[in-house]
Amino acid sequence: DVKVTQSSRYLVKRTGEKVFLECVQDMDHENMFWYRQDPGLGLRLIYFSYDVKMKEKGDIPEGYSVSREKKERFSLILESASTNQTSMYLCASHRPGSPPYEQYFGPGTRLTVT
Amino acid sequence: DAKTTQPPSMDCAEGRAANLPCNHSTISGNEYVYWYRQIHSQGPQYIIHGLKNNETNEMASLIITEDRKSSTLILPHATLRDTAVYYCIVRATDKLIFGTGTRLQVFP
């Protein structure tokens, strides 16, 4: 089974702190994605990566950056956390060439910024 | 990419069929229709997909209208564990764009 894991299920940070959200997949997938999910807004794509050291902006990249130093790991970084970044963050991975629907999700990290 | 419209919520009695509609009137010829669901506190889970023909798997059936402007996900015998938010997505590339989905509540 494809396994996508995220470093924390719940995280509480203070405004202005630097926050790292880690995502690891064990299926050698090239594509990895970060989404945030908010009530009434569904899932929105923040950043994605098609390969190591490659990244592309999604629909809402402002306030975020990413790092992909190894194929299996995709990190989302909040340089200076703000209260409007309180959200559920979901990571996903996908193998290029496989159908787009074969995008596998991690369990999510619920981040609260106070 | 085509935009999808789904009702915000639906109820279904346990054991009955749940029919979840989705409108995608601007769908283009190479775009597939995908359905995912998200059970509370879990990541989204793929259910089924289709292009033109109706599809069925062990989880659900997908009915796509002939003009492809709408589709219906059918859970033939809903159980309490099917309570979730169901997302209809229309996409041609690797990126999936989720809308707000339909919250399905299955009741005893």
Image (cartoon, rainbow, N blue to C red):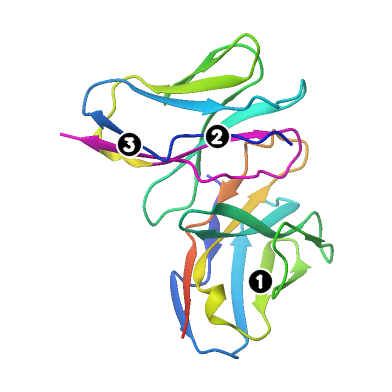
Find residue A75 and report its horizontal and vertical position in percent.
Answer: 67, 70
Q: Residue at x 66, y 71 (%)?
A: A76
Residue span colored magenta? B85-108
**Mark 1 residue type:** Leu
Pointer 1 and pointer 3: residues touching (CB < 8 Å)? no
**Mark 3 residue type:** Asp
Q: Give me the disc on residue B5.
A: 2
Find residue A23 and report its horizontal and vertical position in percent.
Answer: 60, 65
User: Residue B102: which quarter of the image?
Assistant: top left
**Label total for image:** 3
Q: Is residue B76 above or below residue A9?
A: above
Tell me, yes or no, whether dots 2 and 1 are on the same chain: no
Tell me, yes or no, whether dots 2 and 3 are on the same chain: yes
Q: Nearer the viewer, mark 2 or mark 3?
A: 2
Question: How far apart are the two marked residues, 2 and 3, measured between alpha carbons?
Answer: 21 Å
**Which residue carries the number 1 mark?**
A76
